[in-house]
Amino acid sequence: MPGDLERRHADRATVESVQDLRELLAGGASLEAIAAGLSALQTRGLERSELQVHVERMRAENASGRQDPALERNAQLALDLILGSSLPESLSWDAPRMAAVHAAHVLTEDVVHFSAEFAQRPSDLLPPRPIARVSAELLSELAHRAAATIRAGTAEPTPADFFRVPKDPFTTRPAALLAWNDRLLFESLASVYEDALVERLPKAARWPRGRRWGRFTPINETVATWAAPYVVRADVEAFYESVDHALLAELLDYHFPSTDQDAPRAVRTFLDAIMASGVGLPQGVAASDVFAGVYVAPLDLRLELDRWDWTRVGDDYWFPATSIDDARRRLATLEEWLQTLGLRLNGDKTLVLKAETFRRLERPRKNRIERHLERLRQAAGHAILEGDTNEIIERLRQQGVPEEQLWSVFYHGQTPLPDLIEDLRAQLAPQLVDLYDARLSEIVERVRRRDVPGERRAEMETELRDALSAFSGSDIQIEGDDVAVVLSWFPRLAPAFSGYLRHAEGEYLERVLPPLIDASTSDWISAWLVAAVEERPSVVVGSLADALERVVVHRADKPLSRVAAMRSIARVGTLSGETLARVWEEATPAVRSEIALSVFAEPHHYDVGEGRDVTRRYGALR
């Protein structure tokens, strides 16, 4: 942040710029020159009203002195430019322009360089880039160029792109994708506040505290220290979407008074610009965690001041209660405090549980498939012991027990029979992967019949996720129609399916993936499906290669999938410079940033045709 000396120099420069403007108005300057003089003062941080005062003062001095008609005429023209007339040279006072102005007074090159590491991180809600990092040398160059733009007052943010990401089968949240310079500016603003926020928040506010906050104590360990018979989870409804930018700026100014006064204005106008409204934090962006922590800091501090036992993870508040009535009173109090921040509780997700119920639910549990497998193995172990000795020996031979082991058990008495049976249990019943395969088939049939009870949906989704994890590396092949059916009801499983497909055989992928990619109406889902083969160029052949090519060439309406498919065929070596240029030209600033970061991370894959000169062709990123 600028120090006192730099601020004094800036003030002196402002005085000189005002004097330059006076000379322009008195000297018969052109419209363009007057507009440039006003813009210079705006960039130095003068508000519209301050510029008006300066120009009106010049008019008053002229009226009481020289009465120069040219100065009066130019001063009236200057006021038109300040107030935003229809002239194209008029000053803009919109959010992007003011964000650039305020950021120029707040951010130094050191802060920008420090923040570059956070800016290059992929969103944690969107499919990741296979190579998430560019070289340290290039990252430093990108930060240097962005810092120059910021300090010049020309880093005007653009609206973010938003992609609907499923929260459950029927609702979604907006995941944000920002252009590179906007990511870096936002992360730099977060860097201004992060350390002070971590110091200010109570320890009970476990996350988010900042971007570098690591592991925290599991919630069940905290609850175990509470002696009360009830545990309450209070969920804040649509928290990130509800953050009011003007109120956030006031909170920044109040809680961090030593910070540069332009910083809260920079945050407010930046968020207004990228969100294209006065509310909301971009989800999936690291910097948002910092400002989310700032927004709920008043509530966190109030809970601490009133000596509540409590903890917070994200937008969930947890606290003990002595009775149901006590829980209701505390929830009413909490909601009253939340309302002062424009927030409210989510009635569907806010819960009051008996403490013993919570502890039972939080204990690590085997899922129903694993419990079923254990029962089958126990039953198989008992069944093999039925009958006389000769029958038992024959069954054990059928299970592949070597003769020397049978002699050790039955003739020498060196190994107890129950010990041998225990060792064999894993092969005495169906394997876990087989049970998961059967269960997946059962769930698919139920989904086809639309037999998915609301109270069972979460459990079924968990079973499917566990099944996909178990299938990785196995020879289980899920039919494409079954994948489509499952994703239609459980869209959050797209990342799990992507993980399963990463280990599948090439012939299977060529058969199953193309129709899934072509048919998917969700850009987020199809991007996860494409991501499964990004790091496996050897399987991108035949109909799969054709499907990816179609996405790159024709699906501008699915930008996430398009960029993922572009990376896939680039690794195969079939991405032409003409196609790359077309994708670039049709992309938004945010998507262009993803393209450029991919090119910068693996330039050898894009060294073709018009795409050869990466620095020139993708200089827009910088």
Image (spheres, helix red, strand yellow):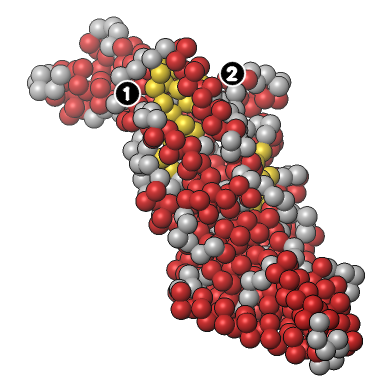
Helix, strand or loop for disc 2: helix
Instruction: Name which quarter of the figure residue 300 lies in.
Output: top left
Considering depth in this image, is 570 or 74 the residue closer to the camera? 74
Mark 2 or 1 closer to N-term?
1
Considering depth in this image, is 160 or 491 the residue closer to the camera? 160
- Where in the figure is residue 245, as x and y percent of width and height? 63, 50
Query: Disc 1 marks which amino acid?
Result: Trp
- Where in the figure is residue 51, as x and y percent of width and height? 73, 72
Is residue 29 depicted above or below 296 in this figure?
A: below
Instruction: Name which quarter of the figure residue 442 lies in.
Output: top right
Query: Disc 2 marks which amino acid?
Result: Glu
Is residue 27 depicted above or below 198 in this figure?
A: below
Helix, strand or loop for disc 1: loop
The residue to which callout 2 is attached is: 455
Residue at the image point whose x is 32% and y is 23% from the top = 226
Q: Which mark is residue 226?
A: 1
